[in-house]
Image (cartoon, rainbow, N blue to C red):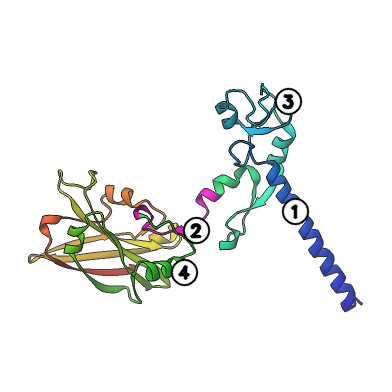
Amino acid sequence: METEESSKRVSTSDGAIVSRVLRTLKNVEELLNCSVCSDFMYGQIYQCLNGHTMCLSCKLRVQNKCPTCRQRLGDIRCLSLEKIAESVEVGCKYEEYGCLEIIPYCRKLKHEESCEFRPYKCPRSPWGCPEAVGDISSLVSHLTDHHRAKLVNDCNFIREFNIEHLREDERCTWMVNVSHCFGQYFSLFAEASHVISAYHVGCIPVYVAFVYFMGKEKDAYNYRYRLEIEVNEGKFVFEGIPRSLREDRLRIMERGDALILMRRSLTRCLDIAVRIWKT
């Protein structure tokens, strides 16, 4: 029968093995860093006569001369590192955010570019906010704390804002509301801009509003929303699928996937009625 003391020894031994494995993996990853760009190397890996290694794209850029020792490069391949790169499996760098994927080293960069656990950027980053804020709950806290976004626990709400604020700053953008419903977060986005693009009518600037889905891109298609604005006894309505927060806002607007109004059609204050529902 296994004693408590022997169980502790086994546990300690297992921990030491795991620690050694992690150190080994870290050393391997360091070996596979390009000496020029510091990115991971895979595919064709080259080396100079003194053994300094680099990726194919850097070899083409350094004009066949090693930037470390200035030796001529030639076409010497480092086949041992190429085999290691093909066989090693590593974890995603976004493990702290929840990704538990173990992936071939050669596919690491491609996976991390589209990993669903990669940190969310603040939607105001084009206007100077540098924050990459992590998961959705961190992003919601960032928006409400730093950008004064109003949080509502409802799928139907009305948001009032003053058009004069937009006229004073035509590049102004808001995440004017964050809505929590159906166990998910959504945000109402409004912008005024003079940038000439497909969503302009001639050269007339427009105001744009749409709803972001704050979650996994594939889950956005489970919802729809409706925006409604009454202006001068008329009504403007838009219905669509909330766009993922991962999507570029300019692409969303250029596709016309939003409520788009010319400035001259708007009054001083607007009430945007928002309804979100599950399909």
- Mark 2 vs mark 4: which is more N-terminal? 2
Mark whose residue sits in front, 3 or 2 = 3
Task: Indicate the quadrant containing the N terminus: top left, top right, bottom left or bottom right.
Answer: bottom right
- Choose between 119 and 124: the one closer to the eye: 124
User: Which region shows up in magenta?
Assistant: 112-127
Give x and y (percent) for residue 54: 64, 33
Residue at image location 61% in from the left, 23% down from the top: 64
The answer to if 122 sits in the magenta stretch is yes
- Mark 3 vs mark 1: which is more N-terminal? 1
Q: Which residue is mark 4?
A: 137
- Separation of disc 3 and disc 4 at Cα? 52 Å
Decide: marks 3, 2 in contact (CB < 8 A)?
A: no
- Callout 3 secondary element: loop
The picture quadrant where one finds residue 278 is bottom left
Q: Which residue is mark 2?
A: 119
- Callout 4 secondary element: helix
Mark whose residue sits in front, 3 or 4 = 3
Q: Residues within 10 Å of mark 1 (few under 14, many from 20)?
A: few
Q: Which residue is mark 1?
A: 23
Q: Amino acid at mark 1?
A: Arg
Residue at image location 44% in from the left, 59% down from the top: 131
Residue at image location 28% in from the left, 69% down from the top: 275
Q: Amino acid at mark 4?
A: Ser
Q: Which residue is mark 3?
A: 49
Residue 122 falls left or right of residue 201: right
The picture quadrant where one finds residue 51 is top right
- Separation of disc 3 and disc 2 at Cα? 41 Å
Give x and y (percent) for residue 47: 69, 29
- Callout 1 secondary element: helix
